[in-house]
Amino acid sequence: MTAAAGSAGTPEELDLDAQIAAYQREFPEVDPQVEKVVTALGRLNRRMNVAYGRQLVDLGISNAEWEVLKALVVVGRPYRLGPGDLAKRLGLTPAAMTHRIDRLVTEGLVTRERDEANRVRVIVELTDEGREKWLQTMRLAAAFEDDLLQDLNTAERAALGEILIRLLRRVETSQPDAGGRLEDLD
Amino acid sequence: MTAAAGSAGTPEELDLDAQIAAYQREFPEVDPQVEKVVTALGRLNRRMNVAYGRQLVDLGISNAEWEVLKALVVVGRPYRLGPGDLAKRLGLTPAAMTHRIDRLVTEGLVTRERDEANRVRVIVELTDEGREKWLQTMRLAAAFEDDLLQDLNTAERAALGEILIRLLRRVETSQPDAGGRLEDLD
DNA sequence: ATTGAAGACTTCATCAGTAAAGTTCGAAGC
DNA sequence: GCTTCGAACTTTACTGATGAAGTCTTCAAT
């Protein structure tokens, strides 16, 4: 097998360096250092999502549902938000939110009721069971994250955090966001 | 409205620190430093995907199609892979791959033909037009990435790359991957 | 009081993904 | 040489997302 080709391996077999090498071969102008950072970032994130996904399966909820629970927890007591607001926070359409809420309601993790003060509005509220479920996910996630960063000492963690935030600031300012689609939100 | 709530803002309005604070409030055992790194990482990645997505729209292809082009380019000339192999590399099911290839074929970016040497196999090959399309995406992506990392000096870039790779190694070794679903691959 | 415009959510049609069954071809055994 | 097993891809049924149209409520202006 040549460089990173190969007949049919799991994705890990494609190691990072081989992939960067391929990019250089096909597109010489590329800066390997930049590409390395960007590729590692994307790959790391994917792995983490897979890991989260597995834990969620164990707890019997989907990633989609988890996002909703997180959003409700973040606003704090009494853990209420409208469907439209939730949709904006999670970066999906109101239509999708309607269905997600349907599922969560049937599982008893949130309640949906009309706002009596303004009957055009709907209030989605986390139930005790929903909050408990979130706590469970959080315990697992925190354990995974601690393990992930185990090899980094405090200084390294701080440096990493600082750099990531600088990058984040750069993207967020360069993109006014145009009020759109944001995949998901933690 | 309390803390980071708000009526209905775009996601950016929820700044990172407020979100971390919310986690600490709701789940005191959490390590804020760890959470900060993890949250920033997730958020950064999301922003980057949005940015890539916009560029792709301008070029008239979807993120899904882009992934396929990348995979074919990475293996090098003659830019050929079977649907099953592609599916593994991109972390999706063969069924999904079938449909993606359908779309790419109608757009003229790849060809699909039976392997005459082994007629149960199918060969997907990048067309010149497909390669050209990939080059265009690469030019845009590289420009965006260079801009993103502009605030980091060489030493910082190296440090970031090194740390990310350490983290990546940790996730990849701790998860044998179980041969499964990997969202996507760059 | 009535009408009109805008906002918030839901419904409908369509699209892309998964899981599982189906099809076709190649290879190994009797 | 026929048959059976297995591999590679496609097809089918279903799920969850999008975008556009629809419904219901509120608010402002006649």
Image (spheres, coloured by chain):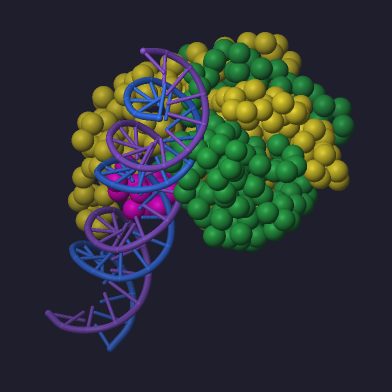
Chain colours: A yellow, B green, C purple, D blue
Start-end of magenta stretch: A86-100
Residue D27 on image: x %, y %: 30, 68
Could you say where residue B52 lies in the image, as x and y percent from the top left? Answer: 64, 49
Residue beneath the point at 47% across and 49% down: B99
Q: Is residue A91 magenta?
A: yes
Between residues B134 and B143, which one lies in front from this camera angle?
Answer: B134
Asked whether residue A34 is in view, the answer is no
Look at the picture and state if B30 lies above or below B135: above
Q: Is residue A94 magenta?
A: yes
Tell me if A90 is positioned left or right of A65 in this view. Answer: right
Which quadrant of the figure contains the N terminus of chain B? Answer: top left
Magenta residues, dominant SS class: helix
Query: Could you tell me which residue is drawn at 86 percent across and 43 percent down?
Result: A28
**In the image, what residue occupies the spot 64% across and 34% down?**
A42
Residue B163 seen in render:
yes
Residue B26 position within the rendered picture, expressed as x and y whole percent measured from the top left: 42, 23
Residue B32 vertical placement versus B10 (above, below): above
Residue positioned 54% across, 32% down in the render: B88
Question: Residue A109: where, in percent of width, then height?
Answer: 27, 31
> Which residue is nearer to you in this view: B58 or A147?
B58
Q: Is residue A109 above or below residue B112?
A: above
Camera-side residue of C2 and B45: B45
